[in-house]
Image (cartoon, grey):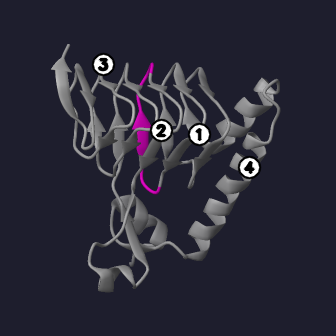
Amino acid sequence: MAKSEKEKMLSGDYYNANDEELVRERDHARNLTFEFNHTKPSEKERRQEILRQLIIAKGRFYIEAPFNCDYGYNIEIGENFYANYGCTILDVNKVKIGDNALLAPNVQIYTATHPTDPIERLKGLENAKSILIGNNVWIGGGTIICPGVKIGDNVTIGAGSVVTKDLPDNVIAAGNPCRVIKRI
């Protein structure tokens, strides 16, 4: 039996993002993020309620508006998660974030990727690679996390970094491309 476009998407295969089911699910997520982003800051309970319809959260967390994502259901966050203003998570594939993770303003997490061959790209197919972020991670403002990256536990990433490769446990890393500066 042939895989659905959603199954292809989640397995990292090339898929058609214009598939009816995927468009419907993205619209659902966009409606929820719109609703979240237009709540008053004092409506904390309502904000949590909306986000719990969107993402998988273990325990306490706080996300500042504005927040954007593709599907929401591919995002899993651990206990004591915080994302500052302007967080964007393109969760075309799984994004798993551990406990005690802190995201500064404008952090961008991208699982989505496209063919590098222009002829293939014109066919409109996409694919995605999952991202794993460990426990006790602090990601500086304006950082971009690229598809397929794994970030270990106890990592600090400097502001403005572009993380293109895996980072081991217990390091401070920064730059474009991001590289280990110091082991802790």
Quarter of the image that includes the N terminus: bottom left
For the C terminus, the image quarter is top left
Separation (CA) of disc 4 from disc 3: 33 Å
22 relative to 101 in the view: left or right: right
Examine the structure image and report whether residue 166 is included in the region drawn in magenta. Answer: no
Q: Residue at x 60, y 47 (%)?
A: 68
| Label 2 SS | loop
Residue bearing the label numbered 3:
154
User: Residue 38 has which mark?
Assistant: none
- Which of pointers 1 and 3 lies earlier in the amino acid sequence? 1
Q: Nearer the viewer, mark 1 or mark 3?
A: 1
| Vertical placement of residue 25 versus 68, above or below | below
In percent of width and height, residue 17 lies at 50, 72
Which residue is disc 4 drawn over? 34
> Mark 2 or mark 4, which is nearer to you?
2
Which numbered tag is attached to residue 86? Answer: 1
The amino acid beneath tag 2 is Val
Magenta part of the protein: which range? 92-100
Residue named by callout 2: 107
SS category of the residue bearing label 4: helix
Residue at 24% in and 43% down: 177
**Disc 4 or 1, which lies upstream in sequence?**
4
The local secondary structure at tag 1 comes to loop
Q: Measure the C-alpha gap from mark 3 to mark 2.
A: 18 Å
Which amino acid is tagged 4? Phe
Tell me which amino acid carries mark 3.
Asn
Cβ atoms at labels 4 and 1 below 8 Å apart: no
Does the CB distance between marks 1 and 2 fall below 8 Å? yes
Q: Earlier in the sequence, mark 4 or mark 3?
A: 4
Which circle's residue, 2 or 4, is located before the other in the chain?
4
In three-dimensional space, the C-alpha distance between marks 1 and 3, rounded to whole angstroms, equals: 23 Å
User: How many numbered marks have been drawn onto this rendered protein structure?
Assistant: 4
